[in-house]
Amino acid sequence: MEHDPRSPWEFNGSFYQPSAFLMMGIPGLEALHPWISIPFCALYLSALLGNCVILFIVRRTPSLHEPMYYFLCMLALTDLGLALCTLPTTLGLFWFGVRRIAFDACLTQMYFIHILSFIESSVLLAMAFDRFMAISHPLRHAAILTRSTVLKIGLAIVLRGMLSLLPIPFLLKRLTYCGRTELSHSFCFHPDIMNLACADIKVNVFYGMIILLSTVGTDFIFIVLSYILIIRTVVSLTTREECLKALNTCVSHICAVLVFFIPMIGLSMIHRFGKNVPPLVNTLVAYTYLIIPPALNPVIYSIKSTHIREALLRVLCRKWGSHW
């Protein structure tokens, strides 16, 4: 059989692998992609600007050099990474109609998207632990969560994400693909690529489920457990004002947890069990999962955190004062 250089397939004996995949925007609304790109641009700008502002404010304000804000910086860095992972392919598709993404580039993007998602889940767990210590054991909080401890937690989170997901690209690369090359999104997602294979994917499915349950699933269970213990502590407080003050320090984190975990669980369920779910629903849930949290988290923390808001106002006042 003569190899056709124009073919999107690479042939090697009986093993076929696509040279590229085709990404999809919002199904049924392809003609409106240039207009749809406007809110997407706004969300990406919000994510990039908002998270950079959080990092800048914490770095410039010595009073914010505490565990809670170190973890917030980790969250901001993760959200920046998530936004930058999907921005080129999403806006490239909406603006210029670029649907093609090389096979290896797709696996690389998928790897980083999943790593950053797992890191965000772990950072949210670390923030829950920080809130638990601050409310339930305030006298031991500073002694346990020192700067070096926070740094070690951050390194452990990154290593766990990188190592647990390292086999995924190789498991996908060993598969034989045939015929279909169209992805469901404008980015590469593990179940999406896996379902395009015409080989036995039981190992991929099993490993994916085990890793998801042992990382994100475990993180979510411990976050819930942390809040059960926090609520038990808050209920034991003597005055209503103390209860409200303690709970108010958790509102931002609870919002961030809900914004991240609800669409993530929804997207995982759709990919594994939602065979009859309309493609539009699948696409909207995916975009909600990857774009909304990075855009909303800086807004949530800027609104709810008095310390962040005051530090931001001080920096802005100094800038304006210097210009006058």
Image (cartoon, rainbow, N blue to C red):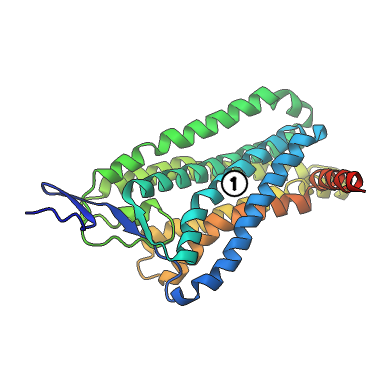
- Amino acid type, callout 1: Leu
Work out whether residue 37 or residue 307 is closer to the camera in this orientation and state it: 37
Work out whether residue 248 or residue 81 is closer to the camera in this orientation and state it: 81
Q: Residue at x 41, y 48 (%)?
A: 110
Q: Quadrant of the N terminus?
A: bottom left
Work out whether residue 24 or residue 118 is closer to the camera in this orientation and state it: 24
Apparent side of residue 92 relative to residue 9 in the rendered image (left or right)? right
Q: Secondary structure at mark 1?
A: helix
Snapshot quadrant of residue 318:
top right
Q: Position of residue 88 (x, y in %)?
A: 49, 54
Q: Is residue 52 above or below residue 23?
A: above
Q: Residue at x 32, y 62 (%)?
A: 182
Snapshot quadrant of residue 120:
top right
Residue 234 seen in the figure: yes
Q: Residue at x 50, y 63 (%)?
A: 285
Q: Position of residue 68 (x, y in %)?
A: 72, 37
Q: Residues within 10 Å of mark 1 (few under 14, many from 20)?
A: many
Work out whether residue 17 or residue 125 is closer to the camera in this orientation and state it: 17
Q: Residue at x 54, y 34 (%)?
A: 157
Apparent side of residue 203 relative to residue 122 in the rendered image (left or right)? left
